[in-house]
Image: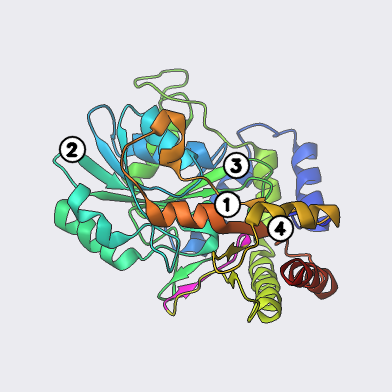
Amino acid sequence: MIHIMEPWLDHQEIDLVMDCLKSGWISSQGKYIAEFEEAFSGFCGSRFGVATSNGTTALHLALLTLGIGPGDEVIVPALSFIASANVVVYTGARPVFVDVDEKTWTINPFLIRPLITEHTKAIIPVHLYGHPADMGPIMKLAEEYRLWVIEDAAEAHGAEYKGHKVGALGHIGCFSFYGNKIISTGEGGMITTDNSEWVEKARMLRDHGMSKEKKYWHPILGYNFRMTNIQAAIGLGQMNKIEKIIAQKRRVAQIYSRGLTGVKGIVLPPEETWAKNVFWLYSILISPETNKKRDDLIEYLNQFLVESRPLFFPIPNMPFYAVEDHFPTAQKISEQGISLPSGSALTPEQINYIIELIKQFFAG
């Protein structure tokens, strides 16, 4: 089976994990936590990083740090993994959904203004499938209305907006290190920011609200959102080759795009002139101009041991979030989208094999 994604792990991670095991510091204390926070936040161009147990807790922690809670509203794109909305509900706030842009598949910044109310406190732009959101107009709106911007960069480590890496464009960036992400710690996440006061608050919140000065004294309600030292050791090993991983991801995308250009009915993934897409998953759309169906292609590829996946459902389609509003672009991309194997270790031969299968499917 050619899988959708596999992490690139080698002796670097093994050596660091073995050192961690020998040290005995295998839980949420140990030198690798701080080293990983410093390495990753520096890579993003942020002053500080706060490691967390996963990408969802990174988003949740960011909202808590900014004091968002009951009665507040947070702007969220209609097309994303459901965690982008769930974390808002966890705080007691309400997610307000915005349709996405047809060119970038990310939140449409020009649809946000009419949805801002006196209760709006933040915007969560999602850098979907590795392509950055159009952050310029979003940050202008945020400044005008005094809103916080929390980047959901779970799928976009190293992606760039006008030459600047995501995660350092808004007020807080949030990342996931799940097993299928650009770099992985198995499970894990991180928030990035330049605000030292937020960092202190976030570190306190992630450790049960415990005082830094007084052991086992908990002046505020906190959470167990901590990353382990073992996970951080894996993360440091990943950081040693993150640029190579991103370069490989873009190489995989180039081979796909070269082979699929001109195939009638296929819309290639976006990359705006101002963007660097890291192609977390190489995702294409099957346009209505062909009589071929996305789900049929998934089944066809599976017969040849090639794993593929549909894109996310629009979050407002979920029973818990059901609303009367319609989000046509999110619906279209969701219904037509398919993600192809995108691992950085894919060989040109494997990619070309998949391309030929897709061409056969459309020719049949």
Q: Residue at label 4?
A: 297
**In front: 184, or 239?**
184
Neighbour class for label 3 at 10 Å: few (<14), some, many (≥20)? many
- Element assignment for label 3: loop
Q: Residue at label 1?
A: 311
Q: Amino acid at mark 1?
A: Leu
Q: Residue at label 3?
A: 188
- Closer to the eye: label 1 or 3: 1
- Closer to the eye: label 4 or 3: 4
Residue at image position (77%, 45%) is 17
**In front: 149, or 204?**
149
Q: Earlier in the sequence, mark 2 or mark 1?
A: 2
Quadrant of the image occupied by residue 304: bottom right
**Residue range highlighted in magenta:** 274-282
Q: CA distance from mark 3 to mark 2?
A: 31 Å
Find residue 137 and report its horizontal and vertical position in percent.
Answer: 27, 65
Q: Earlier in the sequence, mark 1 or mark 3?
A: 3
Q: Earlier in the sequence, mark 4 or mark 1?
A: 4
Is residue 3 rendered to the left or right of residue 98? right
- Element assignment for label 2: loop
Tags 3 and 2 touching, CB below 8 Å: no
Q: Residue at label 2?
A: 119
Is residue 52 rendered to the left or right of residue 141? right
Q: Amino acid at mark 2?
A: His
Residue at image position (49%, 40%) is 82
Q: CA distance from mark 4 to mark 3?
A: 33 Å
**In front: 7, or 339?**
339
Find residue 237 and report its horizontal and vertical position in percent.
Answer: 71, 56
- Judge whether residue 225 is colored magenta: no
Q: CA distance from mark 4 to mark 2?
A: 44 Å
